[in-house]
Amino acid sequence: MKEDTFFKLGKKIDGSRIKSDEMMAGHTTFRVGGPVSCFIEVCDTPELLYCLKVLRENDERFFLLGNGSNLLVHDEGYEGCILKLSGSFSDITIKPAEDPGYYVVSAGAAASLINVSIKSANEALTGLEFASGIPGTVGGAMVMNAGAYGGEMKDVVKTVTLLDINTGDICTRTAEEMGFGYRDSIIRHNDLIVLRADFLLKKGDRDSIWEKIEELKEKRVSKQPLEYPSAGSTFKRPEGYFAGKLIEDSGLKGYSVGGACVSEKHCGFVINKGGATAADIITLIGDVQRIVKEKQGVMLEPEVIIL
Ligand SMILES: Cc1cc2nc3c(=O)[nH]c(=O)nc-3n(C[C@H](O)[C@H](O)[C@H](O)COP(=O)(O)OP(=O)(O)OC[C@H]3O[C@@H](n4cnc5c(N)ncnc54)[C@H](O)[C@@H]3O)c2cc1C
């Protein structure tokens, strides 16, 4: 990254929030990933607009980071700028909606989805129980239309506030306009940044909501290898199949490359058993795709985003 870019960014962003050669292993749930030229914590929308302007004018690449829970960064790192939203982007507020019995939970893009679920549950608001174990940010959840146990963002989102990277325009889109599909939304196909999402939730029974959250937590703990770093399900669910079953039926349970391994607890998860590199994980993903295709005739598509 050019010296001039650092200089200009430093004019408006506090030096403690701009880092060079930051290791991405510390910012991804896989715990792998090399150094990035520039890592910035962006606290509010004016700062974000300023960073984008400087990066555009200096012809620098950049990438928006959520909680890095669906992300695999190469060992060589990233030649460009990582923007991580923080500060006011983590705010969560709750207000009554127009419809009696409904509330709008408004959460900044950097708010943790788990915190939004817990805060809603504590206010006896039902709808986000399914998301209480998804370790992403609200921004990442909008991008991926994150979902679990029969629920997905599409069911609970009222509106999403987006920033157009090219024009700097800010607009609000309804859930219908977000193009939510299976691990997909319009954000994945356009130059957009999520600033905020409003969820429409119904007043319910606090105890039943917490019971549901506990029940789903037990399911996760018993079925998923949460004791190891991972990015959750590595592959998308192919239509008519389950990725984990296809992998297991292909004899790949426990298959490993270096420190990367197909979890024995849940074959749909590639885990970092210790000391894995991004190269190990990428090789393992390729091997799994090839072997499953040979043995089951199905091509698995990674859900994890590779940077
Ligand atoms: C143990 C574990 C369990 C998981 N379980 C589930 C599950 O049940 N269901 C599920 O759907 N997922 C699950 N995941 C995957 C992951 O948590 C989700 O995909 C989550 O939505 C990713 O959010 P993130 O903030 O971590 O995004 P990141 O991984 O940081 O980024 C993902 C993508 O979103 C983009 N992005 C992030 N923030 C913004 C923003 N503000 N504006 C524009 N783009 C942005 C990034 O550029 C990137 O392209 C799991 C992961 C783990 C580690």
Image: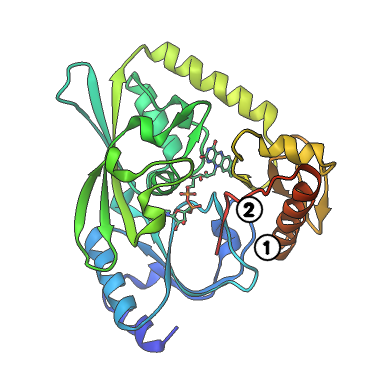
In percent of the image, x 68 and y 29: which residue is there? 223
Colouring convention used in this rendered image of the protein = rainbow
Is residue 252 among what the camera can see?
A: yes
* Residue 140 versus residue 248 in the image, above or below: below
Residue 52: horizontal and vertical position, in percent? 30, 71
Nearer to us in this view, 219 or 287: 287
- Label 1 is placed on what type of residue? Ala
The mark tally for this picture is 2
Disc 2 designates what residue?
30
Residue 273 visible in this rendered orientation of the protein: no
Residue 29: image location, x then y, percent? 59, 51
Image quarter for residue 86? bottom left
Circle 2 crowding by C-alpha within 10 Å: few under 14, some 14–19, many from 20: many
Label 1: element kind:
helix
Specify which label sits upstream in the sequence, 1 or 2. 2
User: What residue is shown with label 1?
Assistant: 278
| Residue found at the far bottom of this picture | 3
For residue 219, side relative to residue 214 (left or right) = right
Quarter of the figure that contains the C terminus: bottom right
| Residue furthest front in the image | 297
Residue 151 vs residue 240: left or right? Answer: left
Q: Residue at x 67, y 34 (%)?
A: 224
Contact between marks 1 and 2 (CB within 8 A): the answer is yes
| Alpha carbon distance from label 1 to label 2 | 9 Å
Q: Residue furthest right?
A: 251
Horizontal side of residue 118 vs 24, given as left or right: left
Residue 68's disc number: none
Does label 2 point to a residue whose CB lies under 8 Å from ligand 1? yes
Q: Secondary structure at mark 2?
A: loop
